[in-house]
Image: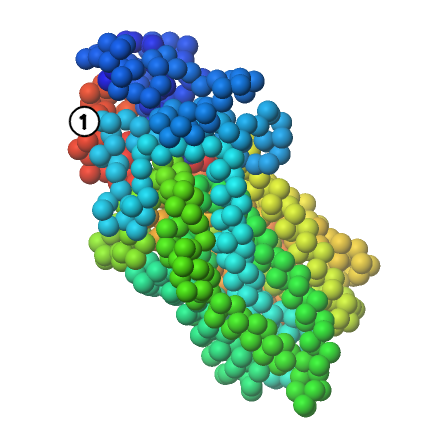
Amino acid sequence: MRAVLTSGETTQPDIPMKRFTSTRYQRLESDDSEQGSGAGDSSPGRFEYQDLEQDKDDYEDSHDFPLGYKQPNKDGNHASAALLKSGKSLALGVAGDERRFFFQRSKVVYDPDAIATQASVFDDPDKLEEYRPGDDWENIHRFDPDERWTWGEEHRLIRKIDSRIMIFAAVMFMALELDRSNISQALTDNFLEDLGMTTNDYNYGQTAFKLSFLCAELPSQLIAKWIGPDIWIPTQMVVWSLVACGQFWLKGRTSFFITRAMLGALQGGFIPEVILYLSYFYKHHELSLRLGFFWTASALSDVMGGFVAFAILHMRGVDGHAGWRWLFLIEALLTLIVGLLAFVLMPSSPTSTASWFRGEKGWFTEREEKIMVNRIIREDPSKGLMHNREPLTPALLWRSILDFDLWPIYILGLNFQTPMSTPANYLTLSLKKLGFDTFKTNLLVIPTKVLHVTTMLALTYAGEVFGELTLTALIGQIWALPFLIFINLVDINEINKWLAWAIMTALLCYPNAHPIQVGWNSRNSNTVRSRTVSAALYNMCVQTSGIIAANIYQEDDAPRYKRGNHILLSLLAVNILLYLGTKVYYVKRNAYRDRVWNSMSEDERLNYLATTTDEGNKRLDFRFAH
């Protein structure tokens, strides 16, 4: 039996060949829920079949399961794993059986022996060669469209990837956060007074840091794509830790500006590089959630940094030096250690974990490598289009920059954090002005970080569980609105200092949509080439937002910052409109492609897939996440 496309037929075989898994974020699928929608429904990806060329006996002779075979239900004693363990079955997991999060799996009868392999374009012989990864892809030796595995195997493997890859990525981010944020703790130890600087000098230094960070994002990402993030990221960390050590010997404004600019230039690109690196190991929805934990590590670093600063700042006077000098030196040395470890703890790909440090056989068995590679490539075939050490040409770079369908997400990145970032930048200074001493100020910042982590993770889970990105991300803006209105109407310097602290804490623990939007940007890129550039461009927009936020509160507006608070409230109102506009844009773009695709005959669709020069998110069979 060979599956062919026809028109007007509504029957399907029991083992359909579907294009993609049950997610509305990627290429369209043919899913069982669409059956019964009528013969006139010709949504993209719907395959209809006839029996041709072979009769039932021939079919069963050429396959390892009988014609009409169906996946048994959860209560059956002959689980699909029985076929899988025989090494012969090409049966696929039931679309929709995937429970993405532990609390979802607890609500159903979870069968760890059920086949987990989800349907994809590789199951259709007419499309297999069109989507087959290139021979130079680093994981090609583990690619096998006939590979099958169980849910139990996949979930155990994900936990192993988390322990080997994700945890250390989070540790590296914590090191980055220590070195780039300890300036706020130094402020509480008379940093400005010791160097003879003003608040405006501090603003200029932070602007120099963020501007350098921003300018280095794309070049650094391109270097990482060329030589590999497993080499470039550790190099960055070692070099910037040495510069951070140099802050121990700061003398005044000039040395402060120089070191901030150098740190920004060396740290720029780190975040998009890690995101690209993690995309080699995780599916899209898995990456979004882990990015939530990634930024949780950043917040955890801030919490730990508060306690560490509390201890180190007590060293003021040791060897005649201020406490903030020891803070910069000790935390930079911690980063240096992490950077050196990164050289040996970051494998270049899922199939390249063997080394003198990680072991002769590597971290993963051959079976695990096959599962890792095939589950990733089945969900997103675009991940096999480029080698992970293949540089981008200027033409490809320019094409990625001009990808206007990603601009709405860039625009969101440019503004969505600004209304909350400005008060966050000045939180320690504000608390000191309210009458809290140095050490109590550092401790009072900690609840903000803890609550912010909690709300951010909850928002990230909600976006994936409910399949709604735009409106979920909008919640953070709605959260902040009443608190920004309050600080516009009431001078918090004149009210009870504990009430003022509570208001600021409530504002700054807003649910941050950053992990959602980073994953959203990656999904809508849909090629490694575009994903490499878009991750950097999005983060450049976020860093630009930081530059803007660092200059909204000015010395002549202190201590009330009335003008600055009016600006923050206005920006938040603009953000609400931007999210709604982004939602409308992607809905309209998808609707347009639906109309074009549905107007094509099945033969025209096959011809398009075989001959199109469209790539990534410009393909007619791609639908944007929103």
* Local secondary structure at mark 1: helix
Q: Position of residue 93 (x, y in %)?
A: 43, 26
Q: Is residue 377 left or right of residue 249?
A: left
Q: Residue at x 60, y 45 (%)?
A: 457
Please state the total of marks drawn on the protein image.
1
Quadrant of the drawing holding the C terminus: top left
Q: Nearer the viewer, residue 184 or 273?
A: 273
From the image, tell me which residue sits under label 1.
607
Write down the quadrant of residue 449 in the picture. bottom right
Q: Nearer the viewer, residue 100 or 467?
A: 100
Write down the quadrant of residue 589 in the picture. top left
Quadrant of the drawing holding the N terminus: top left
Q: Nearer the viewer, residue 415 or 43?
A: 43
Q: Residue at x 61, y 57 (%)?
A: 299
Q: Position of residue 208 (x, y in %)?
A: 47, 71
Check disc 1 and give the amino acid type: Asn
Q: Is residue 219 visible?
A: yes
Up the image or down, 146 lies above or below 134; here it is above
Q: Residue at x 59, y 24 (%)?
A: 109
